[in-house]
Amino acid sequence: TVDGPSSKDWRGGRAASFNIIPSSTGAAKAVGKVLPALNGKLTGMAFRVPTVDVSVVDLTVRLEKGASYDEIKAAIKEESEGKLKGILGYTEDDVVSSD
C-alpha cells in the first residue's frame, strides 16, 4: 500500500505503516465457486497490517434465538456505552486503527 490518496478507497492511503486498514478480498467468493453449497453464505474481509498498537476481534457467535444484524449491532453498541464503556468501542464510521 502506498501512503497517498486513492480514488477507490480513501482509507487505503492512510499511514499504511501504522494502521490496520480494512480492505476487500475475493476469498469468500472463491470458496463459493469451489464449494457451491456455500455460495452466498460467506462474507470476507481482509486487513492490511503492520501496526504499532491496536488489535482486531473477529467475533463469531451462535445465538440461542434469531436476531437481525441491526439487533446485534444495537446490543453491542448498548454494551459499549454501558458496563463495557472504556473497554469496548463501537463506531460505524469509516476509520482506520489509529483513529
Image (cartoon, rainbow, N blue to C red):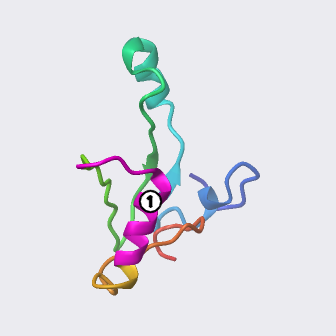
- Is 71 colored magenta in this rendering? yes
Between 50 and 63, the residue placed more toward the observer is 63
- Would you say 22 lies left or right of 58 here? right
Most foreground residue, 61 or 18: 61
Q: Position of residue 35 (x, y in %)?
A: 37, 14
x and y percentages locating residue 64 in the rendered image:
23, 49
Chief SS of the magenta region: helix
Is residue 61 or residue 51 the one in the foreground?
61
**Number of numbered discs present?**
1
User: Farthest residue toward the front?
Assistant: 65
Across and down, in percent, residue 15 comes to: 55, 67
Q: Secondary structure at mark 1?
A: helix
Q: Is residue 24 above or below residue 69?
A: above
**Label 1 is placed on what type of residue?**
Glu
Q: Is residue 59 above or below residue 29?
A: below
Q: Can you see residue 89?
A: no
At x 41%, y 12%, the residue is: 36
Residue at the image point whose x is 45% and y is 45% from the top: 46
Instruction: Write the start and end of the magenta stretch as one range.
Output: 64-79
Can the viewer see residue 66? yes
Quadrant in the picture for residue 2: bottom right
Residue neighbourhood size for the residue with mark 1, other residues' Cα within 10 Å, grouped as few (<14), some (14–19), many (≥20): few
Residue holding disc 1: 71
Q: Residue 16, image x and y in percent?
A: 52, 62
| Residue at the right extreme, as displayed | 7
